[in-house]
Structure formats: structure tokens, C-alpha cells
Image (tube, rainbow, N blue to C red):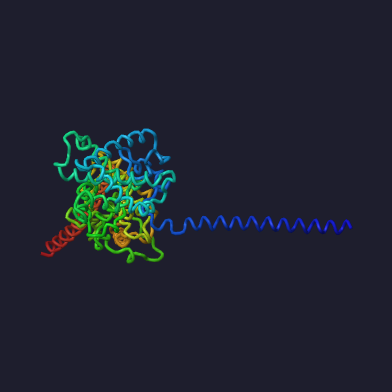
Amino acid sequence: MYLQFSICKFLKFQLVHRCINTWIITQALDGINEKLNEVSGAQSDCTIYRVHRHLRNLNPKAYEPEVIAIGPYHRHNNNSNNNNNNSEHLKMMEGHKLRYLKQLLGPNDPLNDVKRYVAAVSRVEAEARRCYADLPETLTPAEFIQMLVLDGCFIVQLVRKFKSVMLRERNDPIFQKNWMINSLQRELMLFENQLPFFVLCELYDLIEKPYQHSRFWQLLFNFFISLYPGKGSKQMPIVHPRQVKHLLDFLHQSWLPPPRCSGGGNRHEVIIPGKKLGFISSATRLKESNVKFENRPEGNTLFDVRFEEGAMIMAPLTIEDRTEAFLRNLIAYEQYFEHNQNNFVTDYVKFLDCVVDSSTDVEILSRRGIIDNWLGDEGKVAEMVNKLGDSVAGPGSSIVYGEMFEDVHRHCGKRKNKWMANLRRNYLYSPWAIVSVAVGLVLHLFLQSRKRCLLYYRLFEGCWKSILSRAQVEMLKN
């Protein structure tokens, strides 16, 4: 009897345990399926992301606005990385947004104009919401539409005023201070400070003549042109508004080099198994190996770097206070491209990080007119370039300059250039070393000359004695 009771108790325990396990497994599966359904397709329409922590930690200020917040990420201090002081400065610009919106409203029926803007944005509100990868849950549809209208109208009116002096008020503080325009140019292109481009086009169609998007391209290009640190294509291709994701993408497409400007080859031609083509020596080392640096301002673009007959030909690069933020945000944007397509900024920064390793390298390139240093200190430029290099992936075989790197390696590997590099590195590295080499060379020439003189003297002496002895013999015979 006791044995039967024990067996029944054991079987009951096993049944309960199995039921609990089944219930736990079912709950886990339901939870995973629910999360998969939420994620499925959610990222396909996203075009505006947060900057990855790895990139942000290298220089947080390069990605954060200090004057104006556009979009939801830095609105009301939603970004945990944003400090309170910056938040107060960002709130000050909200009044300017309202003032610019008021200037766009007609004097007869301003409320109707506001309704038109709100109605146009509300039609694309759901699509615009899907563009953000990390939209705050507390942002209601009404607040989201209000934000798009205020931010979008401000941007459109700002670029219109920048082009036309007639639209500016006499007491407009934004155009009374040059630093304000410079700051707005920098901050309206920040990766986290963006609106969907089609929202701007919807508002522009209501403010100006509808579907005149080529003029809108020109207004934007004219506003941002001073940000470019070097020559690009500098013309916006005629595309549909839906083919432009946001203002940073607009700048990226405007700077996109033509296919022939690929550093001597295209991305697929330079992939050579077993070889790492993503690295060359610094400008100092290359100069030691008989590599010359030439500035070709009439070249195609900043990215058209070539190596011809022992000379590296580069276009001028201007480095100023906004350059690092400009390049960093473009690099962050290129991280989201598929299959490394059009990563021309990332590739150029990889190349620049190879060539610039110290202030001496910056000095070499500045002397040749390749780097236009507005920071004043070569050390700061070198530090900036090296930190930029930390934000991109390491050497790889797919860098667009890989074929040119191979040409440089072949040039530096020649015996004559190796000998010159060794001579300059080991014997011509300082004025005293040059003096010692010169003294040694003079001493060597002197000793060689002395040996030759002694040799000639001995030969001449032997010949003279032979002639004298023959003369004496002849005299005795006579």
C-alpha cells in the first residue's frame, strides 16, 4: 500500500513538473514571437538613427547640437547624453522657430495658413514616424506633427532668407551674428538632428511654388556650401524628393564624386586575396622614399587622389573648427549603407589617417598647399585626423584607394628608394647628422684623392727613373 502511494505521488510530481515546463516553454515562445513581430520590418523604413555609442564616445560634442534641436532626439532633453546647459540653449531657439513661422503666415487669414501646413504634414505623419529608429514613446501624434511643422518651416525660411536679403528683418538676430549662421550650418547637418526630406518638400511646396524642387535644391546647396572642406561634385543631381532621406543625405549626395574619381581604381578591382591594401606609410616616411606630394587644385574632387611617376597628387583640404563634426557625421551616416556602397568619406579618412601621423606630416602637406590649416596648430590637425581614423574600421581589401596603395608600395620597394629612405632616416635626420655625413664624405674624398696622388706619384717616379736610366745608358754608349 505504501509502495503504491509513493509511486502515485512520484507520477503526480512528474506530471506537474512536466506541465510547468510546458507552460514555461509556451510562455517563452509566445514572448519571442511577440518581439519578433514587433521587430519584423520595423527597421526597413528607418533613415534617421542614433549615433552608435562607439562613435559617440570618441567625441560626443561632434554629434550633439548646441544651438538648435531639430527632430525628436534632442527635443526637451530626451537624449540622456545631452547636458542641462545645452538643453537651455536649445530651448532659446524655439522662440525663433515660432517667429519664422509667423513670418510665413499671410496677414489676412494666418490661421488658415497654419491649417494648411498642419494638414500637409499630417498626411505624411505615419511615414515620417517610421523614419526614426528610436522615437520617444511619450511623443504624441499631435506633438510630433507640431514639431515637424515648426522645425520644417524654420529650415525652409532660413535658407530662403540666406539667399534673399529682401526677406530678412532688420533686427533678425540670426543674421546679425556671423557665428550664428556658422553654427546653424553645422547643426542642421548633424546625423541626429534631422527631419525626413519629404516633409521639407511638402512645406516648401506650400511656401513657394509647388514642385519647384530644383530651386529648393539650390537654396539648400547655397546655404551649406561653406561646410565642404574640399572640392566635390558640388552639384545636386536631379532626383525625386523621395530619393533624398534628409539634409545630411542631401550633403552626402551633393559631395558624391563621379565614378572615375576612385583613387586609381574602383572598389571591386582592388580586392586581391591575401593582401591588405588598406595601409600606406605617413607623409614623412613616403618623402624619405622619394615620394613627392603635389597639389592639383584643378583636379576633379577632394577624393581624386592619384599616384603618378613617384608623385602623390592630392586636392586641397581645408580644416577648420567645423570640419571634424562634418566628417564624423558623414562617417556615422555611411555606417548604415548596404555593402559599403558610396563610403567615399570613410575611405578618404582612412587614407588621410595613413598619410597624417604627426605634426611633421601636416607641415609637409601644408607646405605643398594640400592642407589649408585654419586651426593654426599642426599638432591639433594631426590629433584631429588620428581621432577621425579611430572612428573607421581598420585596414581592409575593399578600400577604394587600394590599387593606388599597391603602386605606392611598389615604388617604395625599389632598391634605389629603399637606399634613399635608409640614408635619410639614419643619417639625415638632424642638422648635426647632415654635418657629420658631409664631414665624413669630405674626409673620404680627401683620403681617396691622397691615395690616387700617391699612386700617380709612384707611377710617375718609376717612369722618370726608367727614362733617366735609359738616357744614361745611351750617353755611355756614345
**In the rendered picture of this protein, how many numbered marks are placed on residues?**
0
Q: Which of 156 and 437 lies nearest the eye of the viewer?
A: 156
Q: Which of 355 and 289 lies nearest the eye of the viewer?
A: 355
Could you tell me which residue is drawn at 65 percent across and 56 percent down? 23
Residue 370's place in the image compared with 77, above or below, is: below
Residue 19's place in the image compared with 323, above or below, is: below
- Image quarter where the C terminus lies is bottom left
- In percent of width and height, residue 152 lies at 28, 46
- In percent of width and height, residue 45 lies at 38, 57
Q: Which of 25 and 335 lies nearest the eye of the viewer?
A: 25
Left or right of 429? Residue 171 is: left
Left or right of 89? Residue 205 is: left
Residue 74's place in the image compared with 297, above or below, is: above
Left or right of 373? Residue 65 is: right
Is residue 453 among what the camera can see?
Answer: no
Could you tell me which residue is drawn at 71 percent across and 56 percent down? 17
Is residue 21 among what the camera can see?
Answer: yes
Left or right of 15? Residue 284 is: left
- In percent of width and height, residue 286 lies at 29, 53
- In percent of width and height, residue 208 lies at 19, 50
